[in-house]
Amino acid sequence: MNFVDTHCHLTDEKFSDDLTEVYHRAENSGVIKIINFGATLDDSFRVVEFAKKFSGMFAGVGIHPEEIENFVENNSAEKIFNLAKENNVSAIGEIGLDYHWEKDSEKRILQQKIFIEQLDIARQLNLPVCVHEREAHGDALKILKNHAHGLRGVLHCFSGSLEIAREVWKMGWLIGIDGPVTFKNSAKLPEIVKAAPREMILLETDAPYLAPTPHRGKRNEPSYLVDIAKKISEIRGESLEEIAEYTTKNAEILYSLK
């Protein structure tokens, strides 16, 4: 069985001492492809370099909504645009909206503006999009409906309701399923996973964050993707082989992985 971890952050300092070992553990567990996402401008440059060093690793470049403070001053849009032309860049992301910590209305509007600007980069380069959305369901959907015409992508680490998920699927976008699906307090997520069309699911770890049970509380890593897949198999009543086959196919189609 082969799996694709469609979202992680291996440039995080938590991997600074053993990245090669982490990568080989992933390979040995069947995770044959990994998409490593940037959150800042510097981080985006680093994920591109990592993808050059490791076979089966790809990069996503973009500015996370919590990291937009110097977006204009750093000429970030032009730099992301040029960086995204690299051969091993498979997506723009992770980009989006995060209202959990940001309560200031003007700064939320700035997040929206920069989200739209990065969606336009994806459109110009014909790249898929990985969206971070936290406690901003309404605004994120509105922006995608109004500014993402012709684009495809995924709502990473999906945390919305089944109704919102159905709106996402209707647009032809996928949802990313991460470690929280294995948690006892996973709330609505199992219901969403059970209802999801096969072609609308991606597997993600978001490593080093959100380690699945039985690793909860530890540093997450791509090899733990199999634990997420096992839980999805249990929820959907499908074999692990089936989960591996169609989620890998979904990842390869969306991100044009070779």
Image (tube, rainbow, N blue to C red):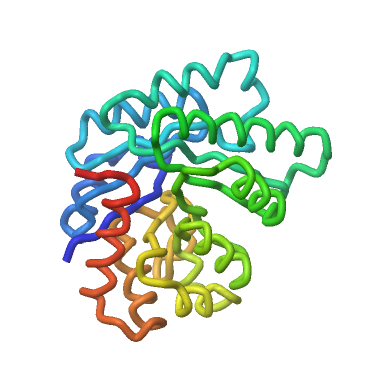
Up the image or down, 133 lies above or below 167; here it is above
State the residue lying farthest toward the right.
Answer: 105
- In the image, 94: left or right of 99? left
Residue depicted at 61% across the width and 49% down the height: 145
Residue depicted at 44% across the width and 52% down the height: 206
> Could you say which is closer to the camera, residue 205 or residue 82?
82
State the residue lying farthest toward the front.
Answer: 150
Residue depicted at 28% across the width and 55% down the height: 4
Q: Quadrant of the C terminus?
A: top left
Q: Quadrant of the N terminus?
A: bottom left
Residue depicted at 17% across the width and 38% down the height: 55
> Could you say which is closer to the camera, residue 17 or residue 179?
179
Up the image or down, 198 lies above or below 40; here it is below
Q: Position of residue 154 (x, y in %)?
A: 47, 52
Q: Which of the 4 image quadrants contains residue 135?
A: bottom right
Q: Position of residue 47 (x, y in %)?
A: 36, 31
Q: Where is residue 75 in the image (x, y as percent from the top left)?
A: 57, 14
> Could you say which is closer to the camera, residue 95 or residue 12?
95
